[in-house]
Amino acid sequence: MELGWVEARGDAFAIGEALGRHARRSIHEMLPTLAEFAGLMTWAGSPRLVAMEKAARAAFPRHVREIEGMAAGAGIDFAKLFAWNCRGDLRFPAGSDLAAAARVEGCTTVFMAAGAESGRPAVIGHNEDGEAEMAGHCFLAEVIPDQEADAGPGFVSFCYPGLLPGHAFAVNRAGLVQTINNIGPDDLRVGLPRHIITRAVLDCADIDSAVTLLSRRDRAGGFHHGLAQAGDPRLLAVEAPPAGCHVRQVESYHAHANHLIEAPFEAAAQRVTPSSASRQERAESLLAADALAGRDPGALLFDRDGELPIHRRGQSPGDDGFTLASAVFEIHPGRVDWSAVVDPSKPPCYHGSIIPQ
């Protein structure tokens, strides 16, 4: 299993075009085999999607332009690709195969606050989980935008074929780190697609601007976001369903899987998969046992204990999720060191440092 790399530069359309061209074969040959993709195509051009596109164009026209470029580079109809970028914002009939397919996507994130006395950096570690069919089709993108007034600082992001960067793990040139966990709230609405929001976060110059975005009340769906920034002591775990936004400042250790766990949402209707419940319970037990005393996030991210383990390989009964890659971000006062791993038994396939200018 490989993790590709592509450089995309220029204006919004050119960036999208490069991403679409890189993923063209996967978009045409792999995506149509996914039940969720096929289900989302039935929404393309619907009044609900037209309204969501209108909202996205009004709020973030450059990111819609990126999808247009991606569609051109991949050779696919824009309406279909926009529907794909509304993944998680649309509800399928309960109990249907499509509803089950939409619940595969996972992820686990672990937070370790900085040690003030020891000088240890804060750490965010993340498992990016998806369909096993995605293995070998995902890639890292280094995005270098033109120097337009609102173009953002550029970033490095994990990418899925046909989806905007930002909804997995990424770090931008301002030293802002974002990791994403899927959640399944039931209060979906017509509004800004959550993939547009996560892409917009990568244009933020600071962590407060990112939280402001996640606090918008016109979001169609939502995610859990891990946020940190070089030079900022805060380590934030943010639950942001359509109903609201809760920001937890991590003071020691914290872990999050794929359902809402914060007190403001304890009565919220949501989908909790057996895998998410198991991974959350296992992560909390590891934290309680001080498994991260050695400051190694892999002690949690690569754990294979139980029938529904944290590190997933699509081989557990009732769990088709697959850990496509793992990332570790060390957040220092003046830089972010990052690495990406596909095989835990091997060294990182990519790594680097971001020094904000």
Image: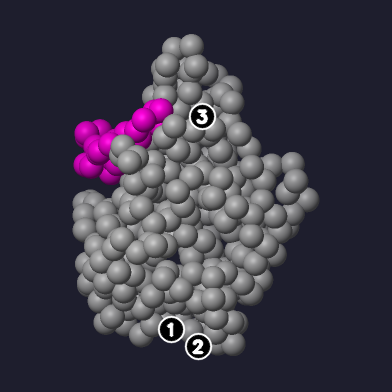
The quadrant of the picture occupied by the C terminus is: top left
Give the mark nearest the N terminus, 3 or 1: 1
Q: Residues within 10 Å of mark 3 (few under 14, many from 20)?
A: some
Name the mark nearer the viewer: 2 or 3: 3
Residue 271 visible in the snapshot? no
Could you say which disc has been placed on residue 79 in the image?
1
Q: Amino acid at mark 2?
A: Gly
- Disc 1 is placed on an element classified as helix
**Residue holding disc 2:** 45
Does residue 229 sit above or below 166 in this rendering? above
Q: Is residue 316 left or right of residue 327?
A: right
Give the mark nearest the N terminus, 2 or 3: 2
Q: Residues within 10 Å of mark 1 (few under 14, many from 20)?
A: many
Closer to us: 204 or 165:
204
Give the mark nearest the N terminus, 1 or 2: 2
Residue 245 visible in the snapshot? yes
Q: Is residue 166 left or right of residue 219?
A: left
Q: CA distance from mark 3 to mark 1?
A: 42 Å
- Judge whether residue 335 is colored magenta: yes
Q: Residue at x 64, y 60 (%)?
A: 216
**Residue holding disc 3:** 233
Q: Residue at x 36, y 53 (%)?
A: 153
Q: Amino acid at mark 3?
A: Pro
- Judge whether residue 54 is colored magenta: no
- Disc 3 is placed on an element classified as strand
